[in-house]
Image: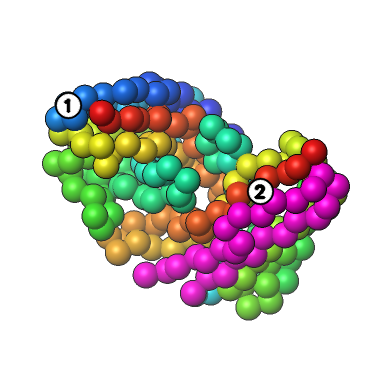
Amino acid sequence: GQQVMQIPQYQHVQEGEDFTTYCNSSTTLSNIQWYKQRPGGHPVFLIQLVKSGEVKKQKRLTFQFGEAKKNSSLHITATQTTDVGTYFCAGPGYSGAGSYQLTFGKGTKLSVIP
Amino acid sequence: SAVISQKPSRDICQRGTSLTIQCQVDSQVTMMFWYRQQPGQSLTLIATANQGSEATYESGFVIDKFPISRPNLTFSTLTVSNMSPEDSSIYLCSVVGQGGGYTFGSGTRLTVV
């Protein structure tokens, strides 16, 4: 089945440093989505990328979708303590049971040292 | 986008008992998804619930252990049956929102003792 791999698993940065998490799929994706989960919270949808080579920005966050639509990255410039949480990428596909589903990466847990 | 009310938010249960988790959506949706998130882990799809038909379960999850109801287009329940400590997890319902992103309920943090 489809696999979505995400690295690194953990990242500790000093406040003000940049942060990047990478996502790779075993198959070509029609789109890729990114979510943020704050400690003790639930995943919150950040963005969806659809086009090959697409780049989207949300303030200090920059999202990229690879040309082959098999990889993606999230880059945060000048991290702040409010960026703390786990960032998940997710790609759509069909499960073994035939259901449409999102397959989530394992996530990157970001800690920001003030 | 849709707003989901999920309850209970947390519970501590004795092994061998069952817990029913409810999700209410503020709009009609075709599919509702139930996920499990074990401590410090990613999200794993348990089943997809469509109104008017039986839920579709993913590999490793069975109806006897996780019965699901979907009586209408705004509501669903997931029951965790005959619980053991291995069932301690966060359980999340979700729906597809505008733009294709998923909206999640706030989650049910289950501890089985």
Q: Is residue A15 left or right of residue A110?
A: right
Q: Is residue B51 left or right of residue A40?
A: left
Which numbered tag is attached to residue B49? Answer: none
Q: Quadrant of residue A2?
A: bottom left
- Picture coordinates of residue A100, whole percent (x, y): 39, 57
Give whichever of A66, B52 is nearer the camera: A66
Tag 2 residue = A110
Q: Residue at x 51, y 58 (%)?
A: A105
Q: Quadrant of residue A63?
A: bottom right
User: Range of the magenta residues?
Assistant: A1-26
Q: Is residue B71 left or right of residue B101?
A: left
The answer to whether residue B30 is seen in the rendering is no
| Label 1 secondary element | loop
- Picture coordinates of residue B82, whole percent (x, y): 15, 33
Q: Residue B19: within the magenta?
A: no
- Residue at the extreme bottom: A68
Give the mark count: 2
Q: If the image is split into quadrants, where does the C terminus of chain A sit? A: top right
Other-residue count near label 1 (Cα within 10 Å), few / some / many at <14 / 14–19 / ≥20: few
Amino acid type shown at disc 1: Thr
Give the dominant element type of the magenta stretch: helix, strand or loop.
strand
- Picture coordinates of residue A102, whole percent (x, y): 46, 55
Q: Chain of mark 1?
A: B
Tag 1 residue = B17
| Label 2 secondary element | strand
